[in-house]
Amino acid sequence: MNKDNILWIFIHPIRTGGVTLIEFIKKNTPKEEVFLASEARYNFKDFQKFNPQKTKFALGHATYYGMHKLALNKEARYFTFLRDPAERVVSYYNAKMEETKKRIPFEVWYRNQIKDDLVNFLDLKYKGSESSRIHTPPNFMPIVRKLNYKNFYLLQNLISKFYKKNKKSDLRKLENAKKLLDACWFIRILDHDEDKDFNLLIKAMGFKNQKWEKKTGLTKNVLKVTPELREKIYKENPLDYELYQYAIRLKNLKRK
């Protein structure tokens, strides 16, 4: 297979170590070959206008399953990074606290977070959504992109409160999340042979220079994951925990 004819599409959940990869690719790849789909900055460009036939990498939180249909002459390889649910939730909290001057107690912050958000995220991506929190109808995306960061997440959280959770809907989301993982060419799980997996991935992408700079992460307000906190997060995010266990088994099969 000609590596120049592969389109690598990164399904990127938050706080899973994806920034290290994105920075490595940006540093070692011509700009015209990297499409950045950044929902957080609301500068998501039309992939077709970017010329998908010349694109080698589609990166960012706003990528979705189905982008390969815009580059029919390419071999699409979806891949994703995942992380232990408790570690990811606490890492997200620490990141938010580093952004603000006033620290919010974890319990207060956590109470307002969407539970099983990884399953929700992958369900949205499998359905072809640019959004990462809830499904936003395409006609409203131009309006959503104009909102500032705080107002965007305020809107997302308000809408999510009107959504009534039910077991059947949750199981459908979990199945969709598993289907997306099944469709991925590669799965990397943070803290599971992560250096080895990273090197395997960038080698498959055709990079000869495999030196990469690991991001050190946060510098202050660091909450640690205690056994009690881990158990609490597992219990309150059962779908995410089940998906995480499924991903570990699937990753090992894909590596073989």
Image (cartoon, rainbow, N blue to C red):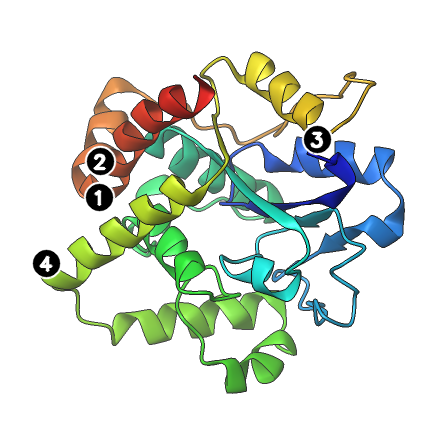
Do the residues under discs 2 and 1 have CB atoms within 8 angstroms?
Answer: yes
- Which of discs 2 and 3 lies nearer the camera? The answer is 3
Name the disc covering residue 239, or none: 1
Quarter of the picture holding the C terminus = top left
Alpha-carbon distance for marks 1 and 4? 11 Å
- Residue 149: image quadrant is bottom right
Q: Of the residues under marks 3 and 1, which one precedes in the sequence?
A: 3
Is residue 137 rendered to the left or right of residue 123?
right
| Furthest-left residue in this view | 167
Q: Nearer the viewer, residue 183 or 191?
A: 183
Residue 141 position, x and y percent, is 56, 79
Quarter of the picture holding the N terminus = top right
Is residue 80 rendered to the left or right of residue 85?
right
Q: Residues within 10 Å of mark 2 (few under 14, many from 20)?
A: some
Do the residues under discs 2 and 4 have CB atoms within 8 angstroms?
Answer: no
SS class, disc 3: loop
Do the residues under discs 2 and 3 have CB atoms within 8 angstroms?
Answer: no
Q: Of the residues under marks 1 and 4, which one precedes in the sequence?
A: 4
Alpha-carbon distance for marks 2 and 4? 15 Å
